[in-house]
Image: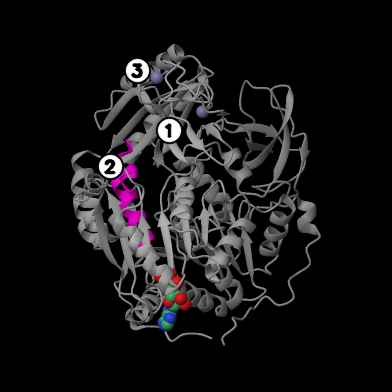
């Protein structure tokens, strides 16, 4: 007998080896490969050896029993096909690092496989919640539900009840969240409702913790798993339910090989397991809403908040008027500042969003216009005052800010474009008695940092929480009655066709943090373009209007969700070589003479250089996903023949980041 082995290397095809003893598909093996030994997975069998090739025997069988639960192998195969990623690498990334068959052999059977929910402190479901639940539970076979509920409409409570239902039926549930640190409340609600039955999987775990949690799931002790992206591979058996909370979040897309989208992978896993999958959001992605519109997904809308709490009132402050009145650019409008002061007097809480960390976006010489760029990347360096350094947010390079302009030696150096660090400092000087907390990537290094600040805010020890998009996510703080949005324009001007969608989502999400308790909430958005449709529609939370308007643009420009899209990124340290290789890729695609695709580029990527590597980009669009797929497969074969590796040309199917 011979086995096809998917080696854990960036290679698209499998290789044949001679079997010395029987193994199963999915078992890990070590095989000789180009003068070394590499890890791989048994992917299939062959009775006859391939002709004309020396077939080597497998060197060593690592696991005699596959660690992959039934269905996970098929899921990995789908990812490998759909995202054009090497099967061996997909399989490897589906398992926690360091796991071995020995761990599993030592597992004792779980004493009580039929778990129970804790039923005391439960609210009566609203009619909307009951209706949603009955649609989710109407069949225990595969179906996809898009749960579109405004912020505070009680979606989490629906997830909990659905999980409870499946638990009672002897089935397991998987709850995917965009980021664990930002969802301690959701995690606590599940752990509180299902004590001893939940496991949590996320990237802040140590290797050992991750293996332990994985084993609790594998052994059947943990029957409800809450986790980020890679938890989509959790070794649950008898899966009944998958929830993808905040399904529109871009952190569900992995930005390295394998470049899978956890939401779409979750739908496929549910299909293979004949489970129910619920995609929840207050601002569904264009893709999911389109799938609901075309009846591929079942649509469930929740139009109002629980207990008929009103949605917050949103006001847009025109910052051009503010400039005219103050005679200079200000960070806080008079309107927003007054609203914050009122909250302090009433002992209510405020959240202020500014989606940029650091103190100043860049340093500008007012004399000659020089801006300080990173020497390795084509982006401006951000000034961080606490460490008095300029930092590159792409590569981490840092340097001291200059006292004089390196170009013209003038001393008129200005700090332009505020970040969260500056916001916090300005607030402190304007409102010295206010207790202020900040959440961004600079202040949140560990899970305990989130717990400290979010816990302090929940306990009322912090009056004002300042932060990046991290504060916009699912938090439920009943005493927040004001949300301020500063610098909302920046996201709109990014060179990305999803800029309006992202801005709409961010504004709706952050506005949804206001007025979740007994008091009505208020939102103040500062903008230099107050008439832009994205602001106008986000303010009134008119999602359907936004979808209709954005759809017209996407259709006209041939962009998703009306067109399939793939990105090709060509990279080289040498600018000329990068451009040449991009041209070669483009010529190869042209030689395939497909009339069913549109190819954009090659052109320098919006961020032309990162870490000294020059980047060129091609985009392929087609109404037929199959056509794109076939072309890219041919390209991969061509690149492999020419020994051009995936570090120089990467392929991204359904790309989310085009910078
Ligand atoms: P979402 O996930 O849609 O933002 P949540 O499920 O967090 O909404 O619900 C918002 C708040 O309302 C939470 O504090 C939750 O405990 C509460 N809640 C949810 N369902 C009900 C209900 N049926 N009756 C009363 N309160 C509820
Ligand atoms: Zn200068
Ligand atoms: Zn850099």
Q: Residue at x 18, y 41 (%)?
A: 556
User: What segment is highlighted magenta in the picture?
Assistant: 488-511
Report x, y in % for residue 382: 47, 35
Note whether ligand 1 is within 8 Å of mark 2. Answer: no
Category of crowding for the residue at label 1, using alpha-carbon neighbours closer than 10 angstroms: few (below 14), some (14–19), many (at least 20): many
Q: Nearer the viewer, residue 399 or 620?
A: 399
Quadrant of image for the N terminus = top right
Report x, y in % for residue 488: 33, 49
- Above or below 192: residue 487: above
Residue 294 seen from this side: no
Q: Name the mark nearer the viewer: 2 or 1.
A: 1
Q: CA distance from mark 2 to mark 3?
A: 23 Å
| Residue designated by label 1 | 362
Displayed quadrant of residue 195 = bottom right
Q: CA distance from mark 1 to mark 3?
A: 39 Å
Category of crowding for the residue at label 3, using alpha-carbon neighbours closer than 10 angstroms: few (below 14), some (14–19), many (at least 20): few
């Amino acid at each position: 007998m011979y086995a096809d082995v998917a080696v854990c290397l960036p290679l698209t095809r499998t290789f044949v080896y001679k079997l010395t003893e029987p193994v199963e598909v999915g078992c890990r093996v070590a095989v000789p490969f180009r003068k070394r030994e590499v890890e791989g997975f048994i992917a299939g069998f062959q009775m006859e050896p391939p002709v004309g090739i020396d077939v080597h025997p497998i060197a060593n069988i690592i696991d005699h029993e596959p660690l992959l639960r039934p269905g996970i192998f098929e899921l990995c195969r789908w990812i490998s096909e759909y995202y054009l990623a090497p099967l061996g690498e997909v399989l490897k990334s589906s398992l926690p690092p360091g796991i071995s068959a020995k761990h599993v052999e030592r597992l004792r059977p779980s004493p009580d496989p039929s778990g129970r929910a804790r039923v005391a402190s439960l609210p009566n479901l609203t009619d909307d919640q009951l209706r949603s639940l009955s649609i989710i539970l109407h069949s225990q076979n595969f179906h996809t539900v898009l749960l579109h509920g405004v912020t505070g409409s009680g979606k989490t409570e629906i997830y909990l009840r659905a999980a409870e239902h499946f638990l009672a039926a002897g089935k397991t549930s998987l709850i995917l969240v965009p980021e664990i640190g930002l969802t301690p409340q959701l995690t606590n609600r599940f752990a509180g409702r299902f004590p001893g039955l939940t496991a949590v999987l996320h990237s802040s775990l140590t290797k050992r913790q991750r293996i332990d949690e994985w084993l609790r799931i594998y052994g059947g002790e943990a029957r409800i798993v809450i986790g980020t992206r890679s938890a989509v591979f959790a070794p649950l058996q008898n899966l009944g339910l998958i929830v993808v909370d905040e399904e529109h979040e871009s952190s569900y897309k992995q930005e390295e090989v394998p470049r899978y989208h956890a939401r779409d992978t979750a739908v496929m896993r549910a299909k293979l397991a004949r489970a129910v999958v619920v995609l929840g959001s207050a601002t569904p992605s264009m893709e999911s809403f389109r799938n609901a519109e075309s009846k591929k997904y079942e649509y469930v809308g929740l139009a109002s908040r629980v207990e008929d709490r009103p949605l917050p009132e949103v006001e847009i402050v025109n910052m051009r008027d503010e400039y005219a009145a103050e005679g200079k650019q200000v960070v806080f409008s008079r309107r927003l500042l007054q609203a914050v002061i009122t909250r302090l007097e009433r002992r209510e809480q405020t959240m202020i969003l500014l989606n940029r960390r650091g103190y100043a976006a860049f340093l500008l010489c007012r004399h000659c216009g020089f801006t300080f760029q990173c020497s390795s990347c084509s982006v401006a360096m951000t000034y961080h005052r606490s460490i008095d350094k300029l930092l590159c947010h792409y590569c981490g390079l840092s340097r001291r800010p200059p006292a004089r302009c390196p170009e013209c030696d003038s001393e008129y150096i200005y700090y332009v474009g505020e970040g969260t660090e500056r916001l916090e400092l300005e607030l402190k000087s304007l409102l010295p008695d206010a207790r202020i907390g900040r959440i961004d990537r600079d202040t949140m290094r560990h899970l305990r940092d989130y717990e400290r600040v979010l816990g302090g805010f929940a306990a009322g020890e912090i009056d004002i929480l300042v932060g990046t998009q991290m504060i916009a996510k699912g938090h439920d703080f009943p005493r927040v009655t004001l949300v301020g949005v500063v610098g909302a324009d920046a996201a709109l001007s990014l060179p990305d066709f999803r800029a309006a969608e992202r801005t709409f989502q961010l504004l709706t999400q952050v506005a949804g943090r206001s007025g979740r308790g007994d008091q009505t909430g208020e939102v103040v958005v500062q903008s230099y373009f107050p008439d832009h449709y994205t602001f106008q529609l986000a303010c009134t939370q008119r999602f359907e209007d936004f979808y209709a308007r954005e759809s017209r643009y996407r259709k006209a420009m041939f962009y998703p969700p009306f067109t399939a899209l793939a990105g090709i990124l060509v990279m080289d340290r040498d600018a000329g070589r990068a451009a040449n290789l991009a041209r070669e890729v483009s010529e190869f695609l042209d030689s395939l003479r497909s009339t069913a695709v549109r190819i954009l580029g090659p052109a320098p990527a919006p961020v032309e250089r990162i870490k000294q590597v020059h980047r060129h980009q091609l985009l392929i669009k087609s109404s037929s996903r199959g056509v794109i797929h076939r072309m890219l497969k041919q390209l991969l074969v061509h690149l492999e023949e020419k020994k051009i590796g995936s570090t120089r040309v990467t392929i991204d199917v359904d790309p989310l980041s085009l910078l």
